[in-house]
Amino acid sequence: MTLTLTSLPENYRAVVFGASGGIGRALLDHIQNDPRCGSVYAASRSGVSVSGVPGVAFNLDDPASIAAAMDAAAADGPLHLVIAATGALHSEGQMEPEKSWRHMSAPRLADAFAINTILPSLIIQAGLDRLARDSRDAPEKAVVAALSARVGSISDNRLGGWHAYRASKAALNQVIRTCSIELARKSKNALCVGLHPGTVDTPLSEPFQRGVPEGKLFTPAYSAERLLTVLDGLTPQESGRLFDWAGEEITP
Ligand SMILES: NC(=O)c1ccc[n+]([C@@H]2O[C@H](COP(=O)([O-])OP(=O)(O)OC[C@H]3O[C@@H](n4cnc5c(N)ncnc54)[C@H](OP(=O)(O)O)[C@@H]3O)[C@@H](O)[C@H]2O)c1
């Protein structure tokens, strides 16, 4: 299916960080097939080309590499669409979702905040600095979006568990809101938002898919198509908020 982001300018310039991930790759596939897209880059730790899209490398251990990757993506001009699709819920190291407060540990909390808060915050920072600005002649829409999660909502937390992941996404949502306030003063057609992709069949959700109700485990392609459609419909008035795959706002 070909998706056309009609709210972005013709020949818009885009970059997806986390392009090696399940949702990141699916976002990239849709964007590169959009006839309105002028250029798109795939940013990942390895820096390899993804789905034929040119790759750029970055590493959280070297924060300057994030700005350098954003520079490479903006080589042809300021960006109109920046998406941070990085994140982790579990890893082979210290990071496992906690079932009890007793499972919280300094390494688990530090890993979760590094990957789910600090990394996307630095991507957002670098993206905002290279975002297309309004001109009086051509007020262009431009978007910085980060994949967050519904479980980062404090008001929606009824189940408990996953302490570090929840907290790291809640902190990311606060960074998004804070940046959006500053962005509104600088550019009236730009947005900074968080997105919840639904439960998606990727390595991140794989160990937790058993309890997912029938029909509620999305393919990456479906979720990516929904997220881009939601982004296309958002206006600057909705900047700073968190939206799910259906376009519904999630309360903080
Ligand atoms: N899948 C779901 O059900 C679901 C639900 C709610 C929210 N989300 C959110 O959606 C986003 C994407 O998740 P996904 O399902 O696509 O997961 P995924 O397939 O596991 O992809 C995760 C991506 O994050 C990158 N990443 C992880 N740790 C990194 C690090 N330290 N430095 C740089 N990159 C790193 C991975 O890069 P490498 O390939 O280099 O490891 C990969 O590109 C995440 O923010 C996640 O929290 C997903």
Image (cartoon, rainbow, N blue to C red):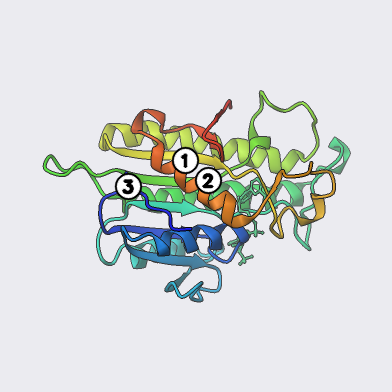
Which quadrant contains ligand 1?
bottom right
Label 2 near label 1: C-beta < 8 Å? yes
Residue 72 showing in the rendered view: yes
The Cα–Cα distance between marks 3 and 2, rounded to whole angstroms, is: 15 Å
The dot on residue 226 is 2
- For mark 1, give the secondary structure: helix
Q: Amino acid at mark 1?
A: Val
Q: Is residue 226 above or below residue 180?
A: below
SS at mark 2 in the image: helix
Please rate how many residues cluster around mark 1, counting C-alpha atoms within 10 Å: few if below 14, some from 14 to 19, many from 20: some
The residue depicted at 32 percent of the width and 47 percent of the height is 6
| Residue located beneath label 3 in the image | 6
Residue at image point 37% right, 52% down:
4
- Residue furthest top as drawn: 155
Q: Secondary structure at mark 3?
A: loop
**Residue 42 locus on image (x, y percent):** 46, 67
Query: Does the residue at mark 3 contact the one at mark 1 (Cβ under 8 Å)?
Result: no
Seen in the picture, residue 176 relative to 33 is either above or below; the reply is: above
Q: Is 183 positioned to the left or the right of 2 in the image?
A: left
- The residue closer to the viewer here, 91 or 9, is 9
Q: Which residue is mark 1?
A: 230
Q: Is residue 193 left or right of residue 158?
A: left
Q: Quadrant of the C terminus?
A: top right
